[in-house]
Each structure stands twice: as structure tokens, then as C-alpha cells.
Image (tube, helix red, strand yellow):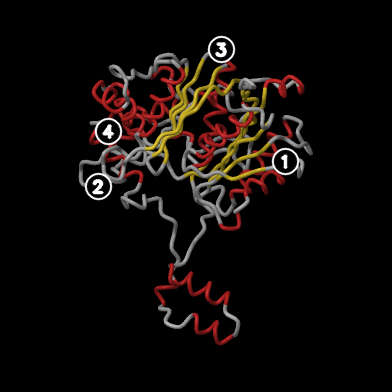
Amino acid sequence: MKTLRDVCIVDARRIPFCKSGTSYMGLSNRDLLKPVMQGLVNDLGLEGERIGEVSLGAVNKHARDWNMAREATIDAGLSLETPAFDIQKACGTSLETVLTLGAKIAIGQIDSAIAAGSDTNSDLPIEFSKKMSDRLLAMNYAKTTMDKLMALKGLMPKDLLPQLPSVNEQRTKLSMGQSTEIMAKNWKITREAQDQLAVESHQKAAKAYEDGFYDKMVIPFQGLKTDPLVRPGTNLEKLAKLKPAFDKSGAGTLTAGNSTALTDGAAAVFLCSEDYAKERGLPVLAKLVMGESAAVDYVSGRDGLLIAPVFAVARMLKRAGLSLGDFDLYEFHEAFAAQVLCTFKAFEDEAFSRERLQWEGALGSVDRTKLNLKGGSLALGHPFAATGARIVGSLAHQLNQRGGGRGLISICTAGGMGVTAILEA
């Protein structure tokens, strides 16, 4: 029986993340992926080469993109002999691609891979009503002109209205923001605490750009060189003036300032075995140690929609024989400031940890001085399927710069799920 191989993270690239409906208006997911994939391939000298596999995905995807990973692989300039497959796991999509491809490298199935993700709300697939779609399909299959016309019989003008995609949960009919408002109230998360986390996110992101941390990782695209959502001048006074965005009853605490904006962007990571890196003289930034996925019962209200990472982290720590304090860096996806703060409170709650996580006492606390040191999603933006790759790349570079250490990744997703991972320098 072969032993598992180390999974190396060699490099990562992304384009600037920008607010939907602005600089990337009308560009497709493939358009966003192309400079990222090509940049990674060219910088690593992989043009025309066959690598083990490519996996990527998008949450908002057109029907024409049914084989998007394969098309993006060809766009990138890799050999046509490189296989590829799509994955979709909401906001955890590209972290899931990293874990899936990493597992294949670990067992020796492949020796190299690109994990990526892209999302745009500026090129959404606009659909018709079910009634209209059914009639159009009937027309498509009809044999005669009369049969085609009969397929349209009974249609009303309202049936012609387009239907925009919704981010509401199908089972609760609540948006992610509305669901997080409920979590914030249940865990008693204050507006002030949320705004403070948002301010810190912007300040850290701005400093990271000033220090040149993102110079190599972020590829200029469409006239952008940095993430335009980063606001260095953000402060508590400015955020306090914003009105609640989801609960407007007077009790709401989530605003546009402490919630992520709808964002467009793409990101990719190159993974390989240690032997592959040595043979090609590739630098290894960090190693993927393990990952974990969890899901919760958000439908009955037993658990908050975005609390699943707590369960994933607890299981992962137990398998790794680690405690929550055994990390030098923490990268928590900031879908909403409230979600991150609810997660921290759950970690620190003894009763919750004992009863729900099967942990003796509280799981522990996250040292905020080690959290999202180069900015988080609140500042940088959150193109759903690209966030995981963005975080993996950033954390790997940070660990490499430190010359050692261990990092924890936590990402919440729609559908009451969470994906987590551990990286080591």
C-alpha cells in the first residue's frame, strides 16, 4: 500500500475583484478565467504541456458553459490532452476543487493540477417563466409549422417577462442576508462589532496593496490593477451612517458596509506533488494538509444557514489532533461580518461545543491579530466560486513569507454548508 504524497501549492493568480455591473459588465466567466489561467500557465512555463487535471466552477453559469473547465483549459494554452471537470459548491466551489485535486495528487492518480473558480453577476443567464420555457421547447420538437404555432397557444403577455436568478434559499425563501440577520440576533452580535470587523478588513487590504503583497498575484485586467472595492478611508463613523440592508424593521444590523457586495472575478491555484515540483524547479509556497466539509439543518431553524464551518473545523481539528489555537494564521471568508462573529461565538460557547460539536469544553478562540491579515472578502470582494482559490493563494504566500507556520481556512456556503482546510508552510 502506497503512503499518501504531500500536496504542494506552487502559485496562484487572480484578476481584480470588482463590483458587479461595473468594469466586467457583459464579460463571461470564461472571459474572466482566461487571463487568470493563462497568467498561471505562462508564469510557470506550462504552455502546451499536459498536466494531470483541471477543475473549476461557477455558481452563476450559462447553459452554454456545461463544459466550462475543459474550455478554460484549452483557452489557457495547456495541451489538449489535459482533462478537466466542473464542480459547483456555492461559495466553497474553488476550495472544493483544491481539496478534490489535492486528494488525487495525494493518492498518486495525478501529479499536477489547476484548481480555479469564477463568477460574474454582470453576465447572468436570464430565463423565462416555466410556462414560456415549456412552450419554446415544444416548438423546438414540433414537426410542422402549424404544430409550432399551436405550441404557443394560450400564452399571455406576462409569460414573456424574463426572470432574474435569485440568491434566496429554495427551502426557506430567505436571502443569505436575511438568514444571517437571524443568526446575528440569535448569537447577539452587535452592529458595532460587525462594523469594526469591516473596518479592519479594509485597512488590512489597503496595507497589503501598499506593501506590494498582491503585485504578482493580481493580474491587471480591463484597466484595473487593484480591487476597487477596497476603501482605505473606511471608518466606524462612515459605516454607522449606513441603513440596515435586510431587516428594515429597526432591529437590523447588517448593512452594505458590513456585508460583501455582489462581485465579479476569477482566481486559480497550481498544485502538484513534491517530486513534480523538484523535477521542474518550482518553488513550493505551502502544503495542503487536509480539508473538511459539513452541512447543517438550516431548514427547521435548528442551525443558522452559515454556521456549518464550525462543525467542519471541529471535525478537522479532531482528525488532525490540533486545537483552535494551534495556528499562526486564520483565513475566514467574510460573507458577512456577522457570520464570522457568529462562528467565533460558537467556538467559544462551552454548551454549544459540548452538545453539538462533541468537544470537551469550548472549542477555543481565534486570535484576531492573526485573522485575514491581507484583508478579507468584505474589502476584497466575493465572486462566489472564486473566493476559495483567492484565499488558498493568499494564505500560501503568507506562510511562505513567514518562513513557516500553519494556517486555517474557513468558508461558509449557501445551502447550510461549510468547507475548511489546513495549510502548512
Q: Is residue 279 left or right of residue 7?
A: right
Say which residue appears at 59% left-offset and 41% top-offset: 56
Instruction: Pinpoint residue 136: horizontal percent, then vertical percent.
Output: 52, 73
Indicate the secondary structure of the residue bearing disc 3: loop
First in sequence: mark 4 vs mark 2: 4
Q: Which residue is mark 1?
A: 82
Instruction: Pinpoint residue 77: horizontal percent, then vertical percent.
Output: 75, 42
Quadrant of res 334: top left
Q: Is residue 115 left or right of residue 247?
A: right
First in sequence: mark 3 vs mark 2: 2
Q: Is residue 354 above or below residue 68?
A: above
Q: Residues within 10 Å of mark 2 (few under 14, many from 20)?
A: few
The dot on residue 248 is 2
> How many numbered badges does the structure rendering display?
4
Give the amino acid at mark 2. Answer: Lys
Q: Which residue is mark 4?
A: 191
Which residue occupies the foreground of this view, 331 or 143? Answer: 143
First in sequence: mark 1 vs mark 3: 1
Indicate the secondary structure of the residue bearing disc 2: loop
The reply to whether callout 1 and callout 3 are in contact (CB within 8 Å) is no
Question: Quick one: which residue is furthest to the top in this view?
Answer: 403
Q: Is residue 164 above or below residue 6?
A: below
Q: Which residue is mark 3?
A: 404
Which residue occupies the foreground of this view, 151 or 327? Answer: 151
